[in-house]
């Protein structure tokens, strides 16, 4: 029995595992994003927060966290950084003063107008090793994997 376990462990190929491959693909995408996006200080997570805020209009941190798939603690830090840059406005909720409501500032809207076309190109570059059929398939598969309920 012990010999079989050691053999199984020896045959484990990290570069054939889904987590490893997803991480490598994400690293490649992030490198392409950072290389081509016009604002060198904008991270992909910050971009996701700006796009989500644009989509939702004025929204709570909880709404943005859920929609952008970013944990609340990380989101607070991202929002704080974007607020310091004058890209987001954060206000207390009128009905619930504990709630923070986030909205885009004009500078944030301007940055998105400049960045979204490039972000579309980044997606195209990320998917460029794939043919059209594979691109459709990988997006479908990733959407399916990302919406699995445990």
Image (spheres, rainbow, N blue to C red):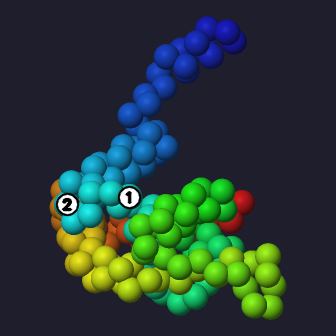
Q: Is residue 132 left or right of residue 49?
A: left
Q: In this view, does 58 lie to the left or right of 111?
A: right
What is the C-alpha distance between the residues marked 2 and 1?
12 Å
Mark sitting on residue 36? 2
Q: Residue at x 49, y 76 (%)?
A: 88
Q: In which quarter of the image is the N terminus?
A: top right
Q: Is 12 situated above or below 96?
A: above
Q: Residue at x 47, y 22 (%)?
A: 11
Q: Which residue is drawn at 55% across and 21% down?
A: 8
Residue 107 point in image, percent of width and height: 35, 80
Please tell me whether mark 2 sits on a helix, a strand or a loop.
helix
Residue linked to disc 1: 43
Residue 10 point in image, percent of width and height: 49, 16
In this orientation, does residue 89 appear? yes
Please tell me whether mark 1 sits on a helix, a strand or a loop.
loop
Residue 35 point in image, percent of width and height: 21, 54
């Amino acid at each position: 029995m012990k010999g079989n376990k050691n053999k199984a462990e020896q045959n484990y190929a990290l570069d054939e595992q889904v987590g490893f491959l997803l991480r490598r693909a994400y690293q490649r995408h992030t490198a392409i994003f950072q290389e081509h996006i016009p604002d060198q200080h904008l991270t992909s997570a910050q971009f996701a927060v700006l796009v989500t805020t644009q989509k939702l209009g004025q929204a709570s941190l909880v709404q943005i966290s859920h929609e952008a798939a970013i944990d609340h603690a990380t989101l607070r830090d991202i929002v704080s950084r974007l607020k310091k840059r004058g890209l987001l406005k954060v206000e207390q909720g009128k009905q619930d003063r504990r709630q923070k409501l986030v909205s885009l500032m004009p500078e944030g809207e301007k940055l998105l107008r400049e960045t979204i076309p490039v972000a579309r190109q980044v997606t195209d570059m990320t998917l460029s090793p794939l043919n059209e059929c594979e691109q459709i398939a990988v997006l479908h598969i990733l959407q399916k994997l990302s919406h699995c309920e445990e």
